[in-house]
Image (cartoon, helix red, strand yellow):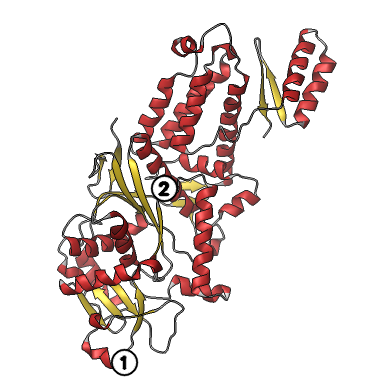
Amino acid sequence: MTLKFHNTLTGRVDEFISQHENQALVYTCGPTAYDYMHIGNWMAYIYWDILIRILIANDYEVTRVINITDVGHLTSDADEGQDKLEKGARREGKTAWEIAKFYADDFKKGLQRLNMIQPQFIAKATDYLPQQLDIVRKLQDKGYTYQIDDGIYFDTSKFPSYADFAHLNLNALQAGARVEFNSQKRNPSDFALWKFTPAGEIRDMEWETPVELLDSTIMLNLPVMGFPGWHLECSAMAMALLGQTLDIHTGGIDHIPVHHTNEIAQSEAITGVRFSNYWLHNNHLKVNGTKISKSLGNGYTLNDLENKGYSMQDFRMFALQSNYKHEGNFTFDNLTAAKNRLQNWRDIAVIRHQIHDGLTDEDNKITDNKAVPSFATCQAIVETVSNDLDTPNALSLIDEIFAKIAKSRLSNISRPALTRLLETINDVLGIQLIETTPDISDEAKQMIIERRNAREEKNWAKSDTLRKELAEMNISVRDNEHDTVWAYIQ
């Protein structure tokens, strides 16, 4: 089976070929742990969870790293402003360390709530300070760094292919340098590897800058406290845990022109080899057609959705209705549509409990043209998602086969094939149809049989009474010419 992704590096949809047979090394840019993540943030992690699932479905053994930025992410891509962790600490009256732990833990809980495959490594930047400083040393030895008043910077002019990845116009950037905050930088695109703590300031998170990294001009003011640059952290963690070259690096499209461009420059300047063979980027999510922002109050969190009566599976279904490359638009009407779609799927999932062994052998039923579904449907889902994570068409494919099942006699439905289909939906899409649709009690089943008998005897009063009693147990019944089919009431 061919696995294909839109690769930002080449600008094409490329067939995925890993460096090592049946192994995939994947790095995902993780959150900055200073506040609750909004639904736009979480959409990306759902998409990258599908990436991991389809790699596994294609028999790859995946080693994955998600980083947590718990220091050094400044409020400006130009390496200016306050560290977001320090800002969060001031906002909540806590230390940056406390803020980082709280929101990192919340992120980990979110991965579980959304039924995501857990990565092998969730790496915190503060745990990789030695590796980050080692990168600075190596870049310094190779002549890529220089020091100014506020830190140690990477000289992008010494990395000839710097502009290639994001197709940057460095001349235009240079022309706009008059608005650059830091006039000491040699080039507007230069970025901080290590920032010095401003004079007179004491940070919650700061470390002594190794003397060998400092110019003699400030040696009299030892020790010089500082902290790593955001871009440096990702390179250090990625290479420490996955090696010099990754198979796949994921992130948001907003990371392309600065963060990922800088990761490539500093990593490849050291190693001389490609940092990642495939780069996948998700597009933004808008809310009611508007950019998510705190000022508009539209940065809904997972808790906000649950408080309005939506489940995490409803939100996952909403996310899968769009392709990761396309700009999404969130409305509560759209989320409600996803919720209804999921409920319809659950109505089909419970049918597996209502299929009984008959005279037809199940093995023959699977190959019978009248039987639904077929095992080929599972393969079709995998093939569809293998084509650049095409979840929208995968959902449509499932809708189509579920519609056929809904119209079929129970005797024509293959229980093994339906169960395998539900397992595939969970494995590939993370939609938990089996876990959320247990069988009903024997008491309820007996009531359904009694109601069926009452209908055959035209005892409509008893039939209606039993229907109401089942409804009180959160069970609905639907009659057709051949069967009575039950489902859970939403």
Q: Residue at x 52, y 74 (%)?
A: 89
Q: Quadrant of residue 484?
A: top right
Disc 2 is placed on an element classified as: loop
Q: Which quadrant of the structure image shows residue 376?
A: top left
Cα separation between marks 1 and 2: 50 Å
Residue positioned most to the bottom: 220
Q: Is residue 428 visible?
A: yes
Q: Looking at this view, is 391 or 137 the one in front?
A: 137
Residue on which disc 1 sits? 221
389 left or right of 191 in image: right
Residue appearing at x 38%, y 88% in the figure: 199
Observer-side mark, 1 or 2, equals: 1
Q: Amino acid at mark 2?
A: Glu
Q: For label 2, count other residues whose C-alpha is less than 10 Å away and answer few (under 14), some (14-19) or many (20+).
A: few
In which image quadrant can residue 323 be found?
top left
Q: Position of residue 441 (x, y in %)?
A: 71, 27
Which of the image's four quarters has the N terminus? top left
Q: Which residue is mark 2?
A: 327
Which mark is drawn over residue 411? none
